[in-house]
Amino acid sequence: MARVVVRAARPEDAAPLTRIAHAAKRHWGYPEAWIAAWREDLTVDEAACAAGRVFCACDGDEPCAFYALERDGDRVSLEHMWVEPARMGAGIGAVLFAHAVETARRLGGRTLEVASDPHAEGFYLRMGARRRGDVPSFPPGRRLPLLELDLASGARQAQLPQFEG
C-alpha cells in the first residue's frame, strides 16, 4: 500500500473529492442516468469541508480517498466514503475507515451508521460492522444495506490498521 496521510479536508478539496465520489460510483457500472440523479448526493460541499466534517487520505498533496461524518446525538453517520478506483484494494479504505471510527469516537458517538452501497457491504462487514436492515434508495424499489458499528466496544479497534495524520 502507498503511504497515505489522513487530514481534514479544506474547502478547496471539495471539487477533487466530488470527482473521486463520481469516479468511484461509476466504477461499479451504474447507468449514467443514475449517476446524474445522484449528482447532489455525490457532491462534497465546501462548507462541510470548512466545518471539519470531511477527511481525506492523501498520497503526497493529492487526495485519493475521503469520508464525511454527521453526528446526531450519540449516533454518527458515515455520509461519504470513497476511494479512487485505481486505488481500490490497496488498503487505503481500511486506513480511512479506521480514522473515521476514531473520529466518530472523539465526537462522542456510540454507534457508527452506514447506509452502504451494495458493492461496499462486504468491506464494512470485514471492518466489524453488522447489518441492521436496509433503507430505500434511488431508483424506486432499490434498497441499501444499513450497517452499524458499536463504537463503545474497543474489541474491533485493535484489528483496524493504523493511520498517519
Image (tube, grey):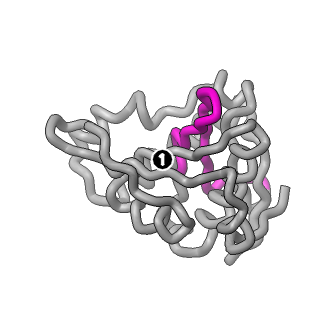
Q: Quadrant of the C terminus?
A: bottom right
Residue 116 spot, x, y in % from top left: 41, 50
Name the residue nearer the viewer: 76 or 23: 76
Quadrant of the rendered structure where residue 60 is?
bottom right
In the displayed structure image, the side of residue 103 where residue 114 appears, left or right = left
Q: Quadrant of the N terminus?
A: bottom right
Residue 57 spot, x, y in % from top left: 70, 55
Name the residue nearer the viewer: 121 or 51: 121
Where is mark 1, residue-wise? Answer: 114
* Residue closest to the far bottom: 1
* Residue closest to the far top: 47
Q: Residues within 10 Å of mark 1 (few under 14, many from 20)?
A: many
Name the residue nearer the viewer: 13 or 138: 138
Residue 41 spot, x, y in % from top left: 42, 32
Number of on-image labels = 1
Q: Residue at x 74, y 34 (%)?
A: 10
* Residue closest to the far left: 141
Q: Secondary structure at mark 1?
A: strand
Determine if the magenta segment contains residue 76.
yes
Determine if the magenta segment contains residue 111.
no
Q: Residue at x 26, y 52 (%)?
A: 30
Residue 22 spot, x, y in % from top left: 43, 45
Q: Is residue 141 above or below residue 131?
A: above
Task: Tell me where the magenta segment starts and ends, as one range.
Answer: 61-81
What kind of secondary structure does the magenta stretch mostly adopt?
A: strand
- Which amino acid, mark 1? Val
Q: Is residue 86 above or below residue 134?
A: below
Quadrant of the rendered structure where residue 6 is?
bottom right
* Residue closest to the far right: 165
Q: Residue at x 83, y 62 (%)?
A: 164
Q: Is residue 141 above or below residue 127?
A: above
